[in-house]
Image (spheres, rainbow, N blue to C red):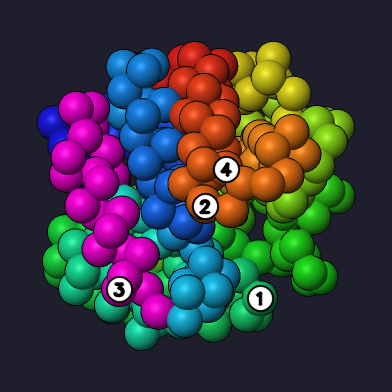
């Protein structure tokens, strides 16, 4: 059960009312930790690489191929996803490398342009069997539809899914990206309204700001793919910082990255339980 398509994980989870954990890979150690956590939980997992992480590495291929290799060696189902791509050429590169899905984010564009660009990307992806997630942006600003006050309207969501042909929809229901405290107030009634109206699985971004019990409630209300990055970076960095504080003479990077990797694996195993994944 190593590398599978994202469609298998997300649709399987949606059909049985479970969550699908999607966690971000920045370093190779993240990919290793995410798979170790999923294996400990006995649950499938989605490894995602964002366009920002690609910018950091100055290329998709090295981290992308390494992540695909880690996925292929796993004993649980693992999919590899391109997160928040704004450039169609980056989507095409991910498709060519063998990614199972992409999130194409044209949410900063006016609605008609978002629809046209998303439909074009979706046609290319579907021609190669790749699953597409997108979002519709009606609220501007740095965090777009993931700003705390932003909300996605269910009727507009249905129209967007029909007009673009996408396979999963990210909706704004009260979270925002990069939250360091778990203080987001989720609109569970709105999630339920979307679940009833929207014909494809729903995706929650910015989930690091959501308390555990609300993540479980979000899945129960109909949320399927749950993206978590920041809280894993918090776990990684805390472990590295503690290790270096206790061992100031260490210079071997393996010595201090190991506790970081272990901390992420443990947090992923715990979160997959919260999400009822598996
Ligand atoms: Zn996001």
x then y, percent, for residue 251: 58, 53
Part of the protein shown in magenta: 59-79
Q: Is residue 27 magenta?
A: no
Cα separation, mark 4 vs mark 1, equals 39 Å
Count of labels shown? 4
Quarter of the figure that contains the N terminus:
top left
- N-term mark: 3 or 1: 3
Left or right: 252 as drawn, with respect to 192: left
- N-term mark: 4 or 1: 1
Q: Quadrant of residue 118?
A: bottom left
CB atoms at circles 4 and 2 under 8 Å apart? yes
The relative height of residue 157 versus residue 140 in the rendered view (above or below) is: above
Q: Which residue is mark 2?
A: 253
Q: Which mark is residue 256?
A: 4
User: Within 10 angstroms of label 4, few (less than 14), some, or many (20 or more) residues?
Assistant: some
Question: What residue is shown at x 50% (from left), y 30% (from top)?
Answer: 262
x then y, percent, for residue 25: 46, 52
Q: Quadrant of residue 180?
A: top right
- Front residue of 12/257: it is 257
Q: Which residue is mark 1?
A: 108
Question: What residue is shown at x 70% (from left), y 26% (from top)?
Answer: 188
Cα separation, mark 3 vs mark 2, equals 23 Å
x then y, percent, for residue 252: 51, 51
Left or right: 5 as drawn, with respect to 122: left
Q: Which mark is residue 251?
A: none
- Front residue of 193/213: it is 213
Ligand 1 closer than 8 Å to label 2 CB: no
- N-term mark: 1 or 2: 1
Quarter of the figure that contains the C terminus:
top left
Ligand 1 closer than 8 Å to label 4 CB: no
Q: Is residue 70 magenta?
A: yes
Which secondary structure lies at badge 4?
helix
């Amino acid at each position: 059960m190593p590398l599978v398509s994202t469609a298998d994980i997300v649709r399987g989870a949606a059909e049985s009312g479970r969550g699908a954990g999607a966690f971000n890979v920045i370093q190779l150690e993240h990919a290793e930790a995410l798979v170790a956590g999923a294996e400990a939980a006995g649950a499938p997992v989605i490894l995602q690489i964002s366009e920002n992480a690609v910018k950091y590495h100055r290329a998709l291929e090295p981290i992308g191929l390494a992540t695909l290799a880690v996925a292929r060696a796993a004993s649980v189902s693992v999919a590899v996803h391109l997160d928040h791509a704004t450039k169609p050429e980056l989507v095409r590169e991910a498709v060519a490398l063998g990614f199972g899905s992409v999130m194409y984010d044209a949410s900063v564009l006016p609605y008609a342009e978002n629809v046209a660009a998303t439909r074009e990307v979706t046609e290319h992806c579907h021609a190669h069997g790749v699953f597409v997630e997108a979002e519709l942006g009606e609220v501007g600003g740095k965090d777009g539809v993931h700003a705390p006050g932003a909300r996605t309207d269910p009727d507009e969501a249905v129209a967007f899914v029909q007009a673009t042909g996408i396979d999963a929809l990210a909706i704004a229901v009260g979270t925002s990206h990069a939250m360091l405290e778990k203080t987001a107030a989720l609109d569970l009634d709105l999630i339920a309204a979307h679940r009833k109206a929207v014909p494809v699985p729903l995706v929650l971004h910015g989930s690091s700001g959501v308390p555990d019990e609300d993540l479980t409630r979000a899945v129960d209300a109909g949320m399927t793919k749950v993206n978590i990055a920041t809280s894993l970076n918090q776990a990684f960095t805390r472990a590295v910082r503690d290790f270096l504080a206790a061992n100031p003479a260490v210079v071997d990077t393996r010595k201090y990255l190991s506790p970081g990797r272990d901390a992420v694996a443990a947090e992923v195993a715990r979160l997959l339980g919260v999400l009822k994944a598996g």
